[in-house]
Image: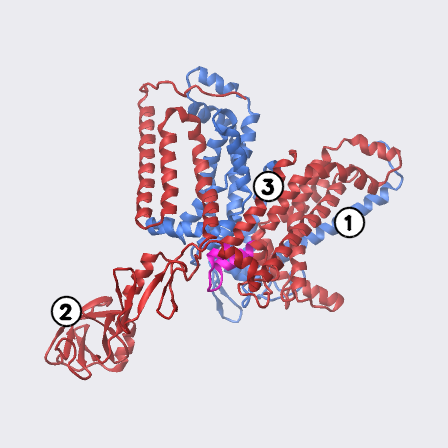
Amino acid sequence: MAMVQPRSIRTRKLGAHFALAGFVTLVVFPLLLVISISFREGNFATGNLIPERFSLEHWALAFGIPWERPDGSVVQPPFPVLLWLWNSIKVAVVSSLMILLLSTTSAYAFARMRFKGKAPILKGMLIFQMFPAVLSLVALYALFDRLGQLVPWLGINTHGALILASLGAVALHIWTIKGYFESIDGSLEEAAMVDGASTWQAFRHILLPLSVPILMVVFILAFIMSIMEYPMASVLLLDESKLTLAVGAQQYLADHNQRWGDFAAAAVLSGLPITIAFLLCQRWIVGGLTSGGVKG
Amino acid sequence: MYTTNASRGLPRHRSRYPAERYTRWTMRALMAVLVLSTLWLVVAFHLRGQWMFALLFLVLGASLAIVFGKRTLMSHRYVFPALAGMGVFVIFPLIYTVGISFSNYSSSNLLSEERVRAQFLEQTYQAEGVAFDFQLYREGDRIRLYLEAKSGAGLEGARRLISEPLGKAGKGKLAVRPTDAPPPGEALGLREVIANRDRLQALTLETPDGTELSMVGLRSFAPMLPRYQENSDGSLTDLRDGGVLTPDQENGFFVTESGERLTPGWPVAVGLDNYTRIFADPDIRGPFLQIFVWTFVFAGLTVVFTLAVGFVLASLLQWDQLKGKAIYRTLLILPYAVPAFISILIFKGMFNQNYGEINLILENLFGIRPEWFTDPWLARTMLLIVNTWLGYPYMLLLCMGLIQSIPRDLYEASAVDGGGPLVNMFRITLPLILKPLTPLLIAAFAFNFNNFVLIALLTGGSPDILGASTPAGTTDLLVSYTYRIAFQDAGQNFGLAAAIATLIFLLVVGLSLLNLRLPKVKV
């Protein structure tokens, strides 16, 4: 705690608050605006942040309910938002569970075992994680195209392909879990093994129950990453009914037909849960993102 | 750290517990199924002539069998699944991309040579001089076709043909046989023919001799003959005019005697062609260099701007005297918490030139309506503004973590010597956090270098560069340029896209090697 204080501290404090508040307003403005727009009537309405002509039209359409305007015309929902959201969640849950399974077992080996090639494998994983999937899209497209000719549920335009393709991005999670495992004292497992437990049993019955918090965090992290995944989904998915939210949402703002109001409602509906989940777990997410200098 | 080697290499006894025995057997059965299914994939890919994929799954299946078959490789069993995932979906695509960059794989050279040959052999042409008028006759709720030769002898001595009744799902082949007279009843009018046109067009009529007839007009069917005949040396003879098509293995096309290429072709190795095109073809080199420079500028400026904003905010938030820091912090990292694909689209709407909120405000205040999406420089400015909004929270969090580790006495000493906040910021804080921050800044640079989602969702690369022979935009980054060459427009040129991707790989390797040599800190 600094003991020596300059005299002008009061004005400076006021200035700092003023600057911060101004900046926060600037940053939060787009988000508030979208919430406001989602309640405005029509797709191009302008106005104050608090809508003058309140309407639930866009929200009804986002939930897939046809909306009857006061003049009697019925508006059909333009896009199946809930279906897209469901697709996103489906893909995200399955792929996060698989990622969790893969990364937990390998993190255990990296944290507790000694085997040939451990250090190079760990380092190599980090380097390969630097290559964005966008660059190998051609190859991934070809892979799933060919695979789909033999195994239809793994071809182009299937969720199976999207889930499988996400399994490459495990290095980050392995590092996160490995760090947590290393912070747990190994003597419990040693004791179990002295009593005759196998390696697997020590892992399954001693270490795993102790690591539930980090597993939750990694699951949520993988879940959020999967929901936000865009490039792979944009290439692998074709039909409107198969799209995930990240790929589908842009259709609201297509060049020739911009549905600003409908988009706003869909964006708030789908973005809010993810935002809240992120804020709740931000402490671990930030730690995971900065370790090893890799940003997801 | 200690090592568990308890169950490695020791003889394992038959377990006393039935449950455990079943688990073991289940595991073994599962492994056997997995190995067998990869082997099936290997054989299937091999039979289709796709040796790259056959090799991939051979390696995968073999390593699976070895790792789970040998008891001494116990530890590797835990690592194997993750490594296999990375191998198949990160490392293999990487190698394959480099491989594609030496080929002419594209939408015109997509199928394998066998498939292209098969496609040519399937082509048919209408034999000259022989054509049949047709009429539809109703029979119960089904329809028969009655054909009568327009002139001459008709086909195989038969001038009149009658078909089997056309089923409801009328598709594929339908047998016809010679007949002497039209079937009883009235022929249906043209209206019915038009109503059934799609079904009739999909129909192939087959005479007892195997000649096939297809619909060639609203009133007539004609025999279709195979157009190409395969010769023993691999060339094809065009039966219509007697010309010979020879397969050109250098370019992957069948060529006629006059040197004309016929599509579709098949992928062949073209050596360094794609790379020389990037650097020699002026229509590609110009846009490529422009995009290359812009990619560096974009990534560099993004890092500078986000760092500047994040650093200033972090310094403010570290000030002990300030109240309400937690609220500010939460509000300030909001842009990081909102999914990027949503916030980018929000900005796309806000920057809209006609009714976007930003132009409304600017017009009310200054009377201007900047054309954010049609002017190249304004579009670039917009990208930087949006990306700074998206990216500064990351820098803020990093800086806050690092500033916390600076000893407080330094500021104390500075205060004693009369240093103000600016002196503190530039003489103490910045120099102390810059060194540990460098690897993270390089990572951020690499990330923004490949910031595909932002470009794809906000501008899509437009406004376009004039005179480019590939789809190229003034706001395109190298990655989005690659993506557009590969997946947009008609000329999907996978080979060229892979060549550019390979160049980006090299740049990323350089960046990560640089990063590995720098010391690491944990925030």
Is residue B11 visible in this depiction of the protein?
yes
Percent x, y of residue A155: 38, 51
Instruction: Please provide the residue range marked out in magenta.
Output: B479-497
When the figure is inspected, residue A33 is found, relative to residue B211, above or below; the finding is above
Percent x, y of residue A231: 51, 52
Q: Chain of mark 2?
A: B
- The residue carrying mark 1 is A19
The mark closer to the camera, 2 or 1, is 2
Tell me whether circle 2 and circle 1 mark residues in contact (CB < 8 Å).
no
Q: Which chain is displayed in blue in the rendered image? A: A
Q: Which chain is displayed in red in the rendered image? A: B
Q: Report whether A3 appears left or right of B55.
A: right
Q: Report whether B510 appears left or right of B98.
A: right
Say which amino acid is labelled 2. Answer: Asp
- The residue carrying mark 3 is B512
| SS at mark 2 in the image | loop
Q: Quadrant of residue A58?
A: bottom right
